[in-house]
Image (cartoon, helix red, strand yellow):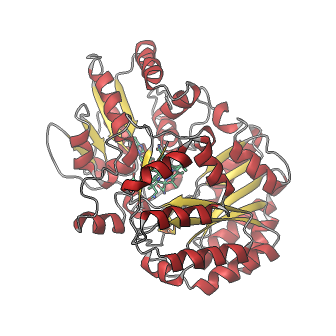
Amino acid sequence: MMRLLENEIMEPLGLMYIAANLLRENIQVRIIDRRVELARHGYSLQKANEIFSECLEQYRPDHVACTVNSVQIPDARLIGEMVRKTPRIKSYILGGPEATIRPEYTMRRIDAANILFCGDGEIPLALYLKGDISKKVDGCVLDRSKSNSVMPYHETNLSILPHPFRQMEGMDYYLTKDKNILVDYGRSLGKASSGMAEVITSRGCNGRCRFCAVCKVTGLTMRFHSLDWIINELKELIESGIDCIYFNDDVFTVEKKRTIELCERIIREEIHKKLKWIAQSRPDAIDEELLALMKEAGCARIEYGFESGSAIMLRKMGKNIALSQYYTVAEKTHQAGLSFQANIIYGYPAETKESVRETIAFLSSIHAHSVLLNVFSPVPGSVVWYEMKQSGCLDGIDINGEWLPAHPCLARKNYTELNNIEWVTSLFQLMRYAPEALSFYEDNEGLFRAVSEISDGLLIYG
Ligand code: B12
Ligand code: SF4
């Protein structure tokens, strides 16, 4: 499994949603987070496997279900092998982003799996476990014994779902652990938070960025929780000692009217006095009015998916936003007294020395409170991934991390026309604006490996 630093491990929200619905249907459930077990035990896969085997013995489940994104295929396969050795287990079930984007492929790669669910898992999994797959959801189930075709299931009324299950064993790990991320958020809140949780108010995004697979996972139509549903979850979290929320929506401000109503409710119900929060937004989905109201409603920080400071790159990435809007939004966010993070992608195929220069000029002018520097990797399900695959650019490269866990890390390749020396040099120049990225590479000894391995165009960090 790809190595996640401890401060990157967030609540397993997808599984927590599913668990809540299973419990409502009186189906017993346990969540085992392999990322936590690995981080706790020095990234020893052997130890994590031992723990998983012990859990199988102790809890004696009838079924094992696993969430799979593109880099988790090798681990899902490993888990499948362990499940196969326990004949009393009736089925090994898959779901999650990769299962939704490429169901047949995922099933082929994880041969211990019997059943795969495409799309939202809450309702279909509960029906399946109760032996009651109805017409409404049967189209999202891929059954190995039938080789049928599948369509993702997307729940249109999100408010029928229970709040994510937060009473599970080990929950403190996510909510109160002194994560670096909290220290950083604490800074933006003016104090260290005593507990942070993630909340989702909507699923999906109306953007169509070419490097992103969100719409393949969540569907093309946006779906929203009702305001009552959200307010109740916030109140429950306050009661359990949480004072900081990370809204995990892809674009929290996607619908202005709804965002205004939500902020007004938060203020009216005095939630803003007990909770500070962070949200993600896009420069074309926010304005002065929203910024002021969000600040009043307790927003402490916004994370903007800027991606680049080059107009050409933005067009190639399918961002569809004028660069001038970026500068305006950054200025208005400062004026509103909100701190913000600039999320940047380096190394998209069209990247040039000029576009890097423009991004650097952009970053030095906007004075973001932090910069999240991501090195581009083609994500299965994104438009650019399909294009690169078709043109043969990805031949011989296994983006799915199929060569993991031998190397518990993610491959970053130079997909640009820059030569490798230019590619590394540009990366280092950008890192001056993102010291966290620099320390991330140093912590992982990846900086040196990056330099030593870049000769064949492959940057590895782990
Ligand atoms: C928050 C987030 C993270 C967090 C961690 C999330 C977590 N679960 O702990 C962080 C920042 C660490 C992260 C890291 C990465 N992420 Co991420 N992440 C997200 C994000 C923004 C939201 C995920 C979320 O909470 N969704 C809300 C819940 C309710 O939905 P869900 O998890 O999908 O679960 C539902 C269904 O999928 C399904 N389901 C899920 N599991 C299961 C299991 C079973 C058995 C069943 C039946 C159903 C089922 O039912 C759930 C409830 O409806 C999504 C974008 C998005 N909107 O999906 C990207 C996304 C999932 N991430 C993505 C990627 C690529 C990554 C990274 C590889 C990025 C990188 N290059 O480093 C790493 C991988 C880390 C790892 N080892 O797994 C891609 C995945 C695409 C793909 N092809 O797999 C997405 C779609 C974004 C994108 N770039 O397009 N991520
Ligand atoms: S990158 Fe962000 S804005 Fe663009 S499509 Fe994905 S979630 Fe939407």
Measured as percent of width and height from the top left, residue 73 is found at: 34, 41
Vertical relation: 62 (above or below) 402: above
Q: Which residue is at the front of the view, 367 or 87?
A: 367
Q: Is residue 398 visible?
A: yes
**Residue 16 on image: x %, y %:** 52, 39
Whether 380 is drawn above or below 352: the answer is above
Quadrant hosting residue 304 = bottom right
Q: Is residue 374 left or right of residue 328?
A: left
Q: Quadrant of residue 249?
A: bottom right
Front residue (pair 67, 166): 67
Residue in the image at 50% along x and 55% along y: 158
> Residue visible at 26% across and 49% down?
103
Residue 193: give x, y in percent of width and height.
79, 45
Residue drawn at x 51%, y 34% as measured from the top left: 35
The residue drawn where x is 73% and y is 56% is 277
In the rendered image, residue 353, in percent from the top left (x then y), is placed at: 51, 76
Relative placement, left or right, of 225 versus 209 is right
Residue 113 lies in quadrant: top left
Among all residues in the image, which is located at the extreme left? 146
| Residue 130 visible in the current orientation | no
248 shown above or below 290: above
Q: What quarter of the picture does the N terminus occupy? A: top left
